Image (tube, rainbow, N blue to C red):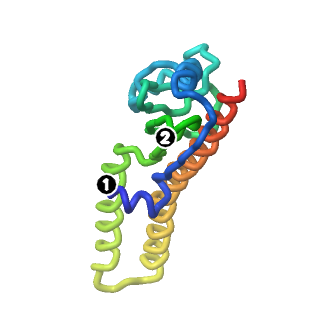
Amino acid sequence: MKRFLERLKLIEYLTTELEIQKNEFVKNFKNHVDERNIDFFFGAFDAFSSSKNEFIGHVDYDHFKIKRRRRFFDMNINFAIAKGNYRQKGERLIIKTEINGFIGMMIPFYIILILFYSISILVIFMSDNMNSNEAIFASFIFFHAIIMFGIPYFVMRRSTQRLKHELERELYYMTKK
C-alpha cells in the first residue's frame, strides 16, 4: 500500500541537513509547534486557537509528528501529516521526514464510490436495448466518476506537496533566527 501511495505521490520524503546542534534544534522546533493531538476529529477545532504557530503536533527529542494548523477562511485543505526523526552527525543535524497526504477515512469513501458506479454502469449496460438517452446517461456517470475520484486525489496530493515545501522552508528559517 505504501509503494502504491508513493507512486501516486501521496507519500513523499524529505531529508534536510542543517548546521545546528540537536538540543538547540529540538528547543526551537518545540517553540514553533503547538503540542496538540493531530487526529482528524481533534483537528476540527484548530481554527479557534489564537496561537501564531503554523504547526501542531508532537515534538520529542528523537522524533516528531506534525501537521499544518487550520485557520479561519483558509482555502487550502491540509490533510498531510509529517513524521520524522533527527540525528546528529558531527556538526550537522540530519532530519528525515515522511510526509503522508493520504487519510484513512478516504478508503470507505472510495469503496462506496466503486460500488455505486459499478452498479450504475451494470444497470445501464444490462438493459436489452440501449437507446441514445441511456448512452448519454452512461457517459455522464463516467464523467461524474472521474470527477469524484479525481478531486479528493488532487487535494491530497497538493496537501502533500504544500506541507513538504512549507516544512522545508520552516526548518531552514528556524536555524537562521
Residue 7 is drawn in which quadrant? bottom left
Residue located at (43% from left, 73% from top): 138
Q: Is residue 62 above or below residue 80?
A: above
Where residue 130 sits: x, y (%)? Answer: 37, 83
Q: Farthest residue in the top direction? A: 50
Q: Is residue 101 left or right of residue 159?
A: left
Name the element at disc 2.
Answer: loop
Q: Nearer the viewer, residue 31 or 34?
A: 31
Q: What residue sits right under mark 2 in the picture? A: 79
- Amino acid at the residue labelled 1: Ile
Q: Which residue is mark 1?
A: 112
Indicate the quadrant containing the C terminus: top left, top right, bottom left or bottom right.
Answer: top right
Residue 57 horizontal side relative to residue 1, left or right: right
Q: Earlier in the sequence, mark 2 or mark 1?
A: 2
What is the count of numbered marks?
Answer: 2
Q: Residue at x 44, y 59 (%)?
A: 6
Q: Nearer the viewer, residue 162 or 129?
A: 162
The image position of residue 73, as x and y in percent, is 65, 29
Mark 2: amino acid: Phe
Location of residue 167 (image quadrant): top right
Q: Residue at x 71, y 29 (%)?
A: 176
